[in-house]
């Protein structure tokens, strides 16, 4: 291209593949700032929300004095943490002790990189062009636990040590199920890029075949409108799309199963109740961060909450349609309105239309995010804590087989759909594939039921032979039983 | 456990890793794996040891090989202090030893003193004592349930139970002006009649509380995580429990139907219609269910007691007519010289029980609470010995914890419902 | 309704792609630097603002208020060691599934073949899984 561009166009308007590296660096910094503001700026709000919401559930007020409705309370807490002494106990492994909070916090911040907040390939995420999105997330997120384990080990405190060990045991419990649940989504979408996952398919591919397409399921969802001369892209979303196109409802119920597995794992990943074993305060005092004070503790605290936001956003992105509205009509300002307003030809869209649309996208993703965060909080308010061998049993005997079978069923359904697509059409093939998968699912459930039944029968035998105590109702004795040698000392 | 016990002398500990004096340390050693256990202090300053209990745990991984409770961090010398106070003044200390069952302690002490003095208590006072004791039991069980659930991680239950306990405290406050340490039950009856509106308040509470029990059951009883965490944990057999001297709900959950309210009725408990909640398995879950059932039974007793107190009439006496133990009414002081002298003697010198010994025992929220008092004829007890149920129940803990995990230990501590003030005294 | 193709979406020509590929990793780099710098800066700020008044009691490890017995650096048995080993095995097998999963719906005529291959793979995985389950590897008490 021989056209010369202005600096402004390089920095802001041209598509990403037409700009030099320095312009991309500038844009990256800008997007990093936006991402950090999103990712970390919301952390105090989660903290506030959690405290107020727990207060609401538990019949008390929660913080309500600092600022309006106590909104500034987390800020005050952070300032307090800054003013606290940074205690480094004797006998700690100094290097690891000092670096552990950074190892815990930095990867969480890093994972903001790939989280998309709208569909633009230039501005839609910190690194919108990154086509390894999910792999990057998994890789980076798994570093965080090292911070916890190292903190536990280096503290020279037995409670910290136990907490660190529990963290490692927790990782090996949930990660398999989580990985397999994510693979289920990859299988349906055929892409690693998170923006493409939200759209339901890879736009760059000629989508000759789209997974699970009895409803819209992504294809035909988006018409793309280039903004001539500026490089902005206006995504026009199909009004007929909606929440039923989200991955969670895709290939029902397999998307839903994957979603449930992922949601359980994400609670475990963030060390939140009922999986808050590494810092179980009633058991291990404070777990891995017993010896930490000041902002080193704050770093763990922040990483937990930021991580909570990150995994929720990933969940939203993977399963709940990311920045898309639950009804297509709510996705963006209708283009006809803009055209009516501006009296311009079809191919021209003013910059503020894009801005408004970006804000609408951001609004939806934040709404979904807070819905999930509220779920986190309600779960915390409701459930007792698991023991860590229970979690491990749950992960290995519950999540792993369910996720694995779910994956296999999705693959089978897809293959069947593919084979029948030519003869039966997309919708017919969808039904054939799904019915076969449903039948297999029922068979798997039957096998599971039989084995549970068998173990139940053996348990009943053990009870009958007196090896295990039976579940018995609490007996109410109307009169006292005769007791051996209970003599009264009354005079 | 496959571990063989090998004692490592204290002298082999590295300097600086100070072993507290007077505590003999046992380390376990497994020759097969060349593995020593890790010794960890749980308490005295730990969130879930319910006070300042210190457990020295020998850990093999996170599995407890041995658990040694160390007590005494809350020792206040209450028994000795009581021996230096007149009977009348010693009463207020009973509120302060097991600080979660004040009225039950009051009653046990009062029963012992009344037995020494051989005074008769008006029937309305007896019913009131029953009513107050059952309310106290509800309040205490509320704290137990809240902290027990909090230990296992069910955080909201803690706040709900605390609200319910507060209602009982408000009832006590309405009665006496004091929220917890009322000393309202005293030798000779009660301190005074109930103020206006008090009975209505109690009735409101009794009408309101059954819903709350249902709510707790909804939250916990069938919660799969709760069952997983408590079923089969901290088992103790009836034989072991009886041998150790465990009493109260902890014993009853193991299948022994022993309840002083039935076996050795005091304060006219024999007139009340109620059942003893008895479990079979003797694990944490069973203890939980027994206490929940006890809440219902307490409510039943309290309702009957309320009706009986109500029937006794507003002006029925709640204090013994014996002027040696109970002060005369205020109006008599203006007219009767004798009353004035009684009043003066009672509040300066106190009363002199005859030489002898007596034990007053009640079924407290945690088990059998007894005050053993020896009188030498003076106005101060010669010897006071308190039997605290927590002390005996705690002895079951090492047996329960063997081979269990740290996470279970907190569940067990919660389930035996100890109060350190009751143990250390 | 206009239906244009986005120029940024039709970038499959290799020469443009490589440029875009490089560019797409720049933000990762920037974010990495920002993340570590931010974490370190926050903690550093605490070091500047916070007081420093150490004393032996403050610096001793917390063990519920009493002097710790022994060290936390002793050899420590990890009961879930076997499961940790199994985790590595299973996790690596999970990693093998990623490329398969991504290319699966794009594989066209090879799809049935891909399915059978993965069924074999998962089948072997499942046999191993069933074996360790029945051997009681997940029970560690």
Image (spheres, coloured by chain):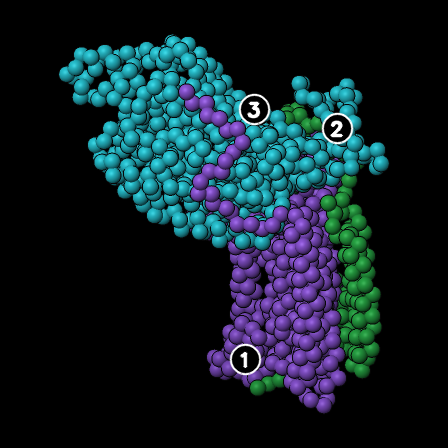
SS under mark 2? loop
Nearer to us: label 3 or label 1: 3
Q: Is residue A145 visible?
A: no
Residue at point 78%, 34% (across, down): B3
Q: Mark 3 or mark 2, which is nearer the start of the sequence?
A: 2
Task: Give the answer, above or below, for where A377 lies relative to A186.
Answer: above
- Residue picked out by circle 1: A239
Q: Is residue C89 visible?
A: yes
Image spot of residue A56 (x, y percent): 45, 51
Residue B73's tag is 3
Image spot of residue C2 (x, y percent): 59, 85
- For chain A, what colour was chosen? purple
- Pointer 1 indicates a residue of which chain? A
- For chain C, what colour was chosen? green
Image spot of residue A118 (x, y percent): 60, 68
- For chain B, what colour was chosen? cyan
Task: Give the answer, above or below, for where A482 lies relative to A320.
Answer: above
SS under mark 1? loop
Nearer to us: label 1 or label 2: 2
């Amino acid at each position: 291209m021989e056209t010369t561009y202005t600096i402004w166009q390089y920095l802001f308007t041209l598509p990403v593949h037409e700009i030099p590296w320095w312009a991309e660096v500038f844009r990256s910094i800008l997007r990093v700032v936006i991402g950090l503001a999103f990712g970390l700026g919301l952390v105090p709000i989660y903290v506030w929300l959690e405290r107020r919401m727990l207060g609401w559930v538990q019949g008390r007020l929660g913080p309500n004095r600092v600022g309006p409705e106590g909104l500034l309370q987390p800020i005050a807490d952070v300032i307090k943490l800054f003013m606290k002494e940074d205690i480094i106990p004797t006998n700690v492994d100094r290097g690891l002790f000092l670096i552990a909070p950074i190892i815990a916090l930095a990867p969480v911040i890093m994972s903001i990189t790939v989280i998309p907040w709208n569909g633009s390939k230039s501005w839609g995420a910190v690194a919108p062009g990154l086509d390894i999105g999910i792999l990057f997330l998994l890789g980076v997120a798994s570093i965080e636990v090292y911070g916890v384990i190292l903190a536990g080990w280096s503290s020279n405190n037995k409670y910290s040590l136990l907490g660190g060990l529990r963290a490692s045991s927790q990782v090996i419990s949930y990660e398999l199920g989580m990985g397999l649940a994510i693979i289920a989504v990859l299988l349906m979408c055929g892409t690693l890029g998170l923006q493409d996952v939200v759209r339901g398919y890879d736009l760059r591919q000629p989508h000759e075949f789209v997974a699970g397409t009895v409803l819209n399921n992504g294809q035909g969802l988006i018409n793309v409108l280039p903004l001539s001369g500026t490089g902005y892209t206006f995504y026009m979303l199909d009004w007929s799309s909606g929440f039923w196109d989200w991955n969670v409802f895709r290939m029902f119920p397999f998307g839903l199963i994957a979603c449930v597995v992922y949601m359980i794992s994400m609670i475990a990943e963030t060390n939140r109740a009922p999986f808050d074993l590494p810092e179980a305060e009633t058991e291990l005092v404070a777990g891995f961060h017993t010896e930490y004070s000041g902002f080193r503790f704050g770093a763990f605290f922040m990483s937990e909450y930021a991580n909570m936001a990150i995994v929720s956003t990933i969940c939203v992105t993977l399963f709940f349609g990311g920045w898309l509205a639950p009804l297509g009509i709510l996705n963006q300002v209708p283009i006809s309105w803009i055209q009516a307003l501006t009296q311009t030809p079809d191919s021209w869209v003013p910059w503020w239309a894009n801005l408004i649309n970006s804000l609408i996208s951001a609004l939806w993703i934040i709404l979904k995010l807070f819905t999930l965060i509220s779920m986190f909080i309600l779960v915390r308010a409701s459930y007792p804590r698991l023991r860590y061998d229970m979690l491990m049993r749950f992960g290995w005997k519950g999540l792993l087989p369910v996720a694995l079978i779910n994956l296999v069923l999705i693959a089978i359904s897809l293959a069947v759909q593919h084979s029948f697509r030519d003869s039966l059409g997309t919708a017919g093939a969808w039904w054939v594939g799904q019915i076969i998968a449903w039948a297999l699912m029922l068979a798997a459930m039957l096998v599971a039921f039989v084995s549970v039944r068998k173990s139940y029968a053996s348990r009943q035998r053990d009870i009958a032979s007196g090896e295990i105590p039976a579940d018995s109702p609490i007996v109410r004795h109307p009169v006292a039983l005769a007791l051996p040698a209970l003599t009264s000392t009354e005079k | 456990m496959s571990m063989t016990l090998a004692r490592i002398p204290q002298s082999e500990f590295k300097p600086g890793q100070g072993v507290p004096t007077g505590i003999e340390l046992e380390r376990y050693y497994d020759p097969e794996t060349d593995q020593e256990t890790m010794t960890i202090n749980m308490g005295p300053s730990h969130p879930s040891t319910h006070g300042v209990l210190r457990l020295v745990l020998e850990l093999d991984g996170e599995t407890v090989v041995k658990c040694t409770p160390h007590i005494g961090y809350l020792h206040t010398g209450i028994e000795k202090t009581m021996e230096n106070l007149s009977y009348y003044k010693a009463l207020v200390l009973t509120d302060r030893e097991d600080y979660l069952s004040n009225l039950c302690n009051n009653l046990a002490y009062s029963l012992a003193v009344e037995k020494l003095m051989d005074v008769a208590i008006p029937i309305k006072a007896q019913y009131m004592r029953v009513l107050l004791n059952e309310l106290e039991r509800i309040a205490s069980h509320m704290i137990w349930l809240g902290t027990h659930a909090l230990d296992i991680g069910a955080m909201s239950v803690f706040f709900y139970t605390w609200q319910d306990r507060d209602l009982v405290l408000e009832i006590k406050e309405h009665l006496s002006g004091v929220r917890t340490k009322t000393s309202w039950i005293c030798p000779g009856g009660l301190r005074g009649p109930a103020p206006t509106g008090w009975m209505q308040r109690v009735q409101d509470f009794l009408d309101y509380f059954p819903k709350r029990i249902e709510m707790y059951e909804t939250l916990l009883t069938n919660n799969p995580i709760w069952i997983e965490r408590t079923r089969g944990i901290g088992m103790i057999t009836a034989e072991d429990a009886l041998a150790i001297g465990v009493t109260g709900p902890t014993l009853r959950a193991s299948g022994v139907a022993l309840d002083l309210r039935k076996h050795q009725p005091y304060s006219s408990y024999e007139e009340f219609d109620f059942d003893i909640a008895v479990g079979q398995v003797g694990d944490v879950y069973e203890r939980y269910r027994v206490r929940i059932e006890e809440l219902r039974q307490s409510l039943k007793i309290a309702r009957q007691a309320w009706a009986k107190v109500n029937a006794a009439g507003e002006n029925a006496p709640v204090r013994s007519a014996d002027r040696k133990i109970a002060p005369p009414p205020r109006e008599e002081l203006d007219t009767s010289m004798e009353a004035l002298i009684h009043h003066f003697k009672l509040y300066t010198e106190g009363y002199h029980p005859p030489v002898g010994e007596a034990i007053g025992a009640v079924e407290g929220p945690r088990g059998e609470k007894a005050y053993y008092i020896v009188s030498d004829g003076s106005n101060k007890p010669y010897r006071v010995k308190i039997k605290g149920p927590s002390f005996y129940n705690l002895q079951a803990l090492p047996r329960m914890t063997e081979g269990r995990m740290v996470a279970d230990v907190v569940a067990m501590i919660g389930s035996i419902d100890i109060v350190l003030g009751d143990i250390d005294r | 309704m206009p239906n244009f193709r986005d120029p940024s979406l039709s970038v499959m020509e290799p020469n443009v792609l490589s440029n875009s590929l490089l560019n797409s990793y720049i933000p990762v780099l920037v974010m990495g630097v920002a993340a570590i710098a931010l974490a370190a800066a926050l903690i550093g700020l605490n070091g500047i603002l916070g007081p420093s008044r150490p004393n032996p009691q403050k610096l001793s490890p917390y063990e519920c208020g009493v002097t710790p017995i022994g060290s936390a650096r002793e050899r420590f048995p990890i009961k879930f060691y076997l499961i940790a080993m199994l985790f590595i095995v299973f996790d690596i097998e999970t990693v093998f599934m990623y490329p398969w999963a991504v290319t699966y719906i794009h594989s066209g005529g090879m799809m049935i073949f891909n399915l059978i291959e993965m069924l074999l793979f998962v089948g072997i995985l499942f046999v191993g899984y069933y074996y360790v389950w029945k051997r009681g590897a997940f029970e560690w008490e």
